[in-house]
């Protein structure tokens, strides 16, 4: 046994979050931790890693009493944390990033480079220790953070939603590295909302509900449906996969659109009421494409047409004026300001709202909070007091309750629990039925298959295929993303012309 926690109580912002948590983890074990947003996962990880102090209960580490008051004290005891929205100075070399915060951080770069090279080689990765962190995709930065844990000689590694927006093939590489670490006798607490993922990587799974560990299960003896039921206390409804093409008029068309050398000659359209999926690796150009449509990055050639009329979208303000909303996947640093009400209520026409309007807006906000399962006791509380997943829900709900005609959503379900995903799916369907067009960028292939009428796949700056939902599956999408020939005789996927 490496770590044991008994009857842990902790509060945040005068609200009791942990109400008697008990869990344990042994050396060489991966313990999965799942829970709805606001269940207390991040607070618990803060207590274990020295970021947050508990008020009652006992923790032992390797048989000794353990009660760290700072993250540095936890690190000295061999406990390391990779937080959900980790940030690394993009100007650091990989070698410097791996050893930052350790007793070796001040060594000459040549020495750090040699040690980093050996670590990278031992783990079996392909990273250049002299490359800057800013040149890496998010999945590679996550691996650098894992290497930092190795350099710190962490015996317990806590990973909080690190893989939330990584595509499946990058998650597989991360899992490979984690299994190598536990073979060395380390222990890992792994938090994720992906229930199929936690079953594949964990030995045991602890279900956190309302500030307590409700149940701990052997991963090999459970399934996604049981885990979902334990989290939500009801069966998943399960939506109907879209099968028929949308018959609505054309809302948006990108014609021969290019963005520098990142996106080349892309053409596709989105119909009114259509949910159009986009997927690709981080270097495929898919991010630059949606940024060009949202005005976050200007296109360099080609045309964008809205309702058949050519439009210029050079800034986010241009997009808003054209009733195009954009939820980016920028990393939330927790510094959001303002109340939940301010974050969710729709903007009026100007002037002071009447009492009736004010009451109607508050009722609307309360309904969104209920429907999205946002964990709060006060809708006038500050957004910063919410969990990371609940802050994501507020951002998402704000866009979904506007009067935009086209919504561009990048990883809208990143970091939100399975119950809220159901609500998001229902709200997207309701919006599409009113004629709103939706472009959905996601690395979760099962989400794209479940939600989208068609899915476009980007690779090497080009839109290589557009797949009708009825004719595709996750394997087809992965093979188009990676450029590997798909040879399964069971596939009848066809190219759908734009």
Image (cartoon, rainbow, N blue to C red):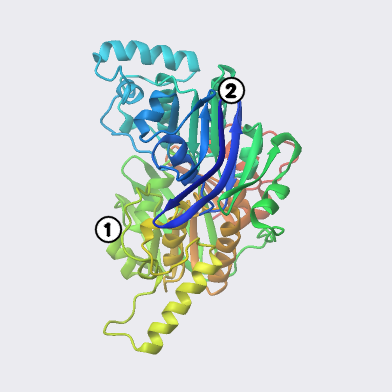
Is 372 situated above or below 216?
Answer: below
Q: Position of residue 474 (x, y in %)?
A: 63, 43
Between 257 and 435, the residue placed more toward the observer is: 435
Q: Residue at x 28, y 64 (%)?
A: 317
The answer to whether 375 appears left or right of 1 in the picture is left
Between marks 2 and 1 in the image, the one whose residue lies nearer the viewer: 2
Specify the quadrant of the image occupied by residue 345: bottom left
Specify the quadrant of the image occupied by residue 245: bottom right
Decide if residue 495 is in sight here: no
Quick one: quadrant of the N terminus?
Answer: top right
The answer to whether 85 appears left or right of 179 in the picture is left
The answer to whether 455 appears left or right of 403 in the picture is right
Decide if residue 192 is in sight here: yes
Q: Earlier in the sequence, mark 2 or mark 1?
A: 2
Q: Position of residue 439 (x, y in %)?
A: 48, 58
Residue 314 image label: 1
Which residue position is annotated with label 2? 27
Q: Position of residue 224 (x, y in %)?
A: 70, 46
Look at the numbered disc 2 and give the secondary structure of its residue: loop
- In space, the residues marked 2 and 1 are separated at their CA atoms by 54 Å
Tell me the crowding category of disc 1: few under 14, some 14 to 19, or many 20 or more residues within 10 angstroms, Cα based: some
Q: Position of residue 378 (x, y in %)?
A: 44, 68
Q: Residue at x 23, y 13 (%)?
A: 108
Between 416 and 32, the residue placed more toward the observer is: 32
Q: Residue at x 38, y 39 (%)?
A: 51
Is 40 situated above or below 46?
Answer: below
Between 131 and 303, the residue placed more toward the observer is: 131
């Amino acid at each position: 046994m490496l770590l044991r926690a008994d009857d842990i109580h902790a509060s945040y912002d005068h609200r009791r979050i942990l109400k008697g948590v008990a869990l344990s983890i042994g050396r060489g074990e991966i313990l999965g931790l799942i829970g709805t947003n606001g269940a207390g996962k991040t607070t618990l990880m803060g207590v274990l890693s020295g970021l947050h102090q508990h008020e009652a209960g006992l923790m032992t580490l390797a048989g000794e009493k353990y009660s760290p008051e700072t993250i540095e004290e936890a690190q000295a005891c061999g406990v390391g944390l990779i937080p959900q929205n980790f940030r690394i100075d993009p100007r650091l070399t990989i070698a410097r990033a791996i050893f930052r915060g350790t007793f070796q951080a001040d060594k000459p770069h040549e020495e750090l480079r040699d040690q980093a090279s050996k670590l990278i080689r031992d783990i079996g990765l392909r990273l250049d220790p002299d490359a800057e962190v800013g040149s890496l995709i998010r999945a590679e930065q996550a691996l650098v953070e894992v290497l930092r844990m190795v350099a710190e000689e962490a015996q317990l590694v806590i990973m909080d939603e690190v893989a939330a927006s990584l595509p499946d093939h990058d998650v597989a590489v991360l899992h490979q590295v984690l299994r190598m670490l536990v073979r060395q006798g380390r222990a890992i607490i792994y938090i994720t909302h992906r229930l199929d993922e936690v079953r594949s990587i964990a030995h045991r799974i602890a279900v956190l509900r309302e500030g307590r560990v409700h149940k701990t299960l052997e991963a090999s003896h459970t399934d996604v449906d049981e885990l979902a039921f334990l989290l939500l206390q009801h069966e998943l409804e399960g939506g109907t996969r879209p099968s028929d093409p949308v018959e609505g008029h054309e809302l948006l068309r990108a014609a021969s659109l290019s963005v520098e050398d990142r996106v080349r000659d892309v053409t596709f359209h989105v119909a009114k009421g259509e949910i159009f999926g986009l997927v690709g690796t981080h270097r495929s150009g898919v991010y630059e494409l949606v940024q060009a449509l949202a005005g976050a990055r200007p296109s360099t050639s080609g045309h964008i047409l809205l309702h058949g009329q050519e439009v210029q979208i050079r800034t986010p303000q241009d997009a808003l004026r054209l009733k195009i909303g954009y939820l980016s996947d920028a990393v939330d640093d927790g510094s959001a300001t303002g109340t939940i009400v301010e974050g969710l209520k729709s903007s009026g026409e100007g002037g002071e709202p009447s009492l009736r309007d004010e009451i109607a807006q508050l009722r609307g906000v309360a309904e969104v909070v209920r429907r999205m399962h946002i964990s709060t006791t006060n809708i006038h509380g500050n957004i910063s007091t919410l969990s990371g997943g609940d802050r994501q829900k507020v951002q998402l709900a704000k866009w979904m309750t506007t009067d935009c005609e086209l919504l561009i959503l990048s990883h809208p379900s990143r970091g939100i629990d399975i119950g809220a995903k159901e609500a998001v799916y229902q709200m997207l369907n309701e919006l599409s039925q009113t004629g709103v067009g939706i472009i959905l960028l996601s690395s979760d292939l099962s989400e794209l298959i479940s939600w989208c009428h068609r899915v476009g796949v980007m690779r090497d700056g080009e839109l290589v295929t557009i797949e009708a939902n009825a004719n595709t599956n996750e394997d087809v999408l992965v093979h188009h993303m990676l450029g590997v020939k798909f040879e399964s005789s069971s596939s009848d996927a066809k190219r759908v012309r734009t």
